[in-house]
Image (cartoon, rainbow, N blue to C red):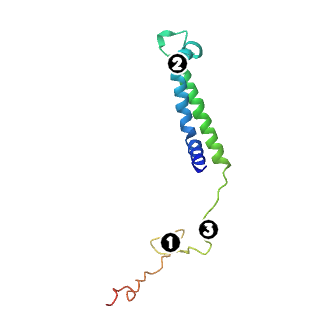
Amino acid sequence: MKNAVLYILVFATLLPTVSQWGTVAYYHANKDYIARVLCENRDKPELHCDGHCYLAKRLKAQQDKQDKETTERVQNTPVVQLFCDSNQAFLFHPVITELLSSACSGYVVPAYVAPVTSFFHPPCA
């Protein structure tokens, strides 16, 4: 049972990619029929289209359909903010010096404090 579910999920995941291959396989299997009946340029044999116009049109339609589904899925997906830390605050204080104008502001960086080295030592034997 688990194998059947696994195969179904893999097939459903790969279906959009396989659908284009299926269209190309259908074209190659029915090339003569498509060239005689469905080709837009069947009246102009000097173009040697042989149904390539039909194949291109079908592939373009599939790509447009996939793009439309993707954009709809993206637009309808709610945006969820995963991380929110309200405790973190940045302090911006205006810096007024002779070199900077009064409109500029700078980020106040806290003074560097070296880590305590008494904890970081090799173990005594």
Give the percent coordinates (x, y) of residue 22. Answer: 55, 30
Which mark is nearer the camera, 1 or 2? 2
Residue at horizontal 37 percent and vertical 85 percent from the top = 120
Q: Earlier in the sequence, mark 1 or mark 2?
A: 2
Of the pair 42 and 85, the residue shown nearer to us: 42
Of the pair 117 and 27, the residue shown nearer to us: 27
Amino acid of disc 2: Lys
Mark 2 packing: few (<14 Cα in 10 Å), some, or many (20+)? some
User: In the drawing, what numbered circle is on residue 31?
Assistant: 2
Image quadrant of residue 80? bottom right
Mark 1 packing: few (<14 Cα in 10 Å), some, or many (20+)? few
Which of the image's four quarters has the C terminus? bottom left
Question: What kind of element bears circle 3?
Answer: loop
Q: In this picture, is 41 found above or below 79? A: above
User: In the drawing, what numbered circle is on residue 84?
Assistant: 3
The residue tagged 1 is 106
Of the pair 104 and 87, the residue shown nearer to us: 87
User: In the drawing, what numbered circle is on residue 16?
Assistant: none
Question: What kind of element bears circle 2?
Answer: helix
Q: Residue furthest front?
A: 1
Give the percent coordinates (x, y) of residue 94. Answer: 54, 74
